[in-house]
Every structure is written in structure tokens, then in C-alpha cells.
Image (cartoon, grey):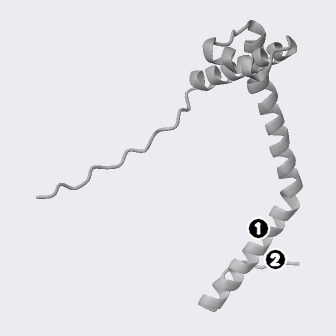
């Protein structure tokens, strides 16, 4: 007797703030460490050995940089860009709505053969 396969489990994406924030801090700390090591004159091989053996140091500068970048500057820039996009697309969206209404009225009149929409009085 065969048993039906169980439901497949899909991985749930990690949307927790703490994990994302820690990942951003570690990435920024790694960039800062690599920059300071290159500034000291170390080669890429020496830098990669240090990366393997030591965890990057997280300073208050790095934490503040991530906070300002990820929670102040980026949402502000994204909001400006989205608002600008909507302002640019407004005439096109208005024409799409008008054409859709006219096309819908045409289809309605073609299918039912009567005009139930009110016409504008002039």
C-alpha cells in the first residue's frame, strides 16, 4: 500500500528586522576592515587570511552609518523616486483609464445592444 506524499514545505523568507540589521552591520564592518587593511598596505592574500581567522570589529560609527543609510536616507530616496514616477506617469495613466472606459462601453454596447451609460449633457 502506497502512502501519499506529504505537503511540500517551502522555506519562509527571513523578514525579521534584527537579522537583516545584523547582516547589514556585519557587511559594513567587513568593508571597513578591508578598507583599513588595504590602507595599511596588506595584500589581498593577507587580507583573506585575516578575514578567515578574525571577526570584524563593529564600532558605533558602523552602527550609526547603517542606521542612517538603511532607515533614513534609503526610504527617503525611494519615496522621492516613487512619487516622481507617479507624477511622470499621471497623464499616461489618465489616458489609460479613459481608453479603458470607452473600450468597456463599446464592449457593453456590442454585447447587449443598448446604451445604459449616461451621456454628458451639453
Q: Pointers 2 and 1 in contact (CB under 8 A)?
A: no
Q: Residues within 10 Å of mark 1 (few under 14, many from 20)?
A: few
Residue 19: x and y, percent? 57, 24
Q: Which mark is residue 33?
A: none
Which image quarter holds the N terminus? bottom left
Say whether residue 34 is visible: yes
Q: Which mark is residue 97?
A: 1
Residue at screen point 72% across, 13% down: 63
Q: Secondary structure at mark 2?
A: loop
Say whether residue 67 is visible: no
Tag in front: 2 or 1: 1
Q: Is residue 111 above or below residue 16?
A: below
Left-right relation of 40 to 3: right
Residue 47: x and y, percent? 73, 18
Badge 2 or badge 1: first in the primary sequence: 1
Q: Is residue 122 above or below residue 65?
A: below
Q: Nearer the viewer, residue 96 or 109?
A: 96
Which image quarter holds the C terminus? bottom right
User: In the rendered image, which residue does mark 2 sit on?
Assistant: 120
The picture quadrant where one finds residue 11 is top left
Residue at screen point 78% across, 17% down: 32
Q: Nearer the viewer, residue 38 or 13?
A: 38
Q: Is residue 19 above or below residue 107?
A: above
The picture quadrant where one finds residue 119 is bottom right
Residue at screen point 64% across, 83% down: 108
Left-right relation of 1 to 33: left
Count the numbered circles shown: 2
Residue at screen point 83% across, 68% down: 95
Q: Secondary structure at mark 1?
A: helix
Left-right relation of 59 to 8: right
Residue 13: x and y, percent? 52, 37
Q: Residues within 10 Å of mark 2 (few under 14, many from 20)?
A: few
Amino acid at each position: 500500500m502506497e502512502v501519499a506524499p506529504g505537503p511540500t514545505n517551502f522555506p519562509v523568507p527571513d523578514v525579521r528586522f534584527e537579522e537583516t540589521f545584523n547582516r547589514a552591520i556585519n557587511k559594513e564592518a567587513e568593508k571597513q576592515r578591508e578598507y583599513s587593511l588595504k590602507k595599511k598596505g596588506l595584500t589581498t592574500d593577507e587580507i583573506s587570511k585575516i578575514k578567515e581567522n578574525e571577526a570584524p570589529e563593529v564600532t558605533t560609527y558602523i552602527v550609526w552609518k547603517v542606521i542612517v543609510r538603511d532607515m533614513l536616507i534609503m526610504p527617503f530616496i525611494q519615496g522621492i523616486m516613487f512619487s516622481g514616477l507617479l507624477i511622470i506617469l499621471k497623464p499616461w495613466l489618465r489616458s489609460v483609464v479613459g481608453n479603458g472606459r470607452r473600450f468597456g462601453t463599446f464592449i457593453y454596447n456590442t454585447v447587449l445592444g443598448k446604451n445604459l451609460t449616461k451621456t454628458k449633457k451639453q
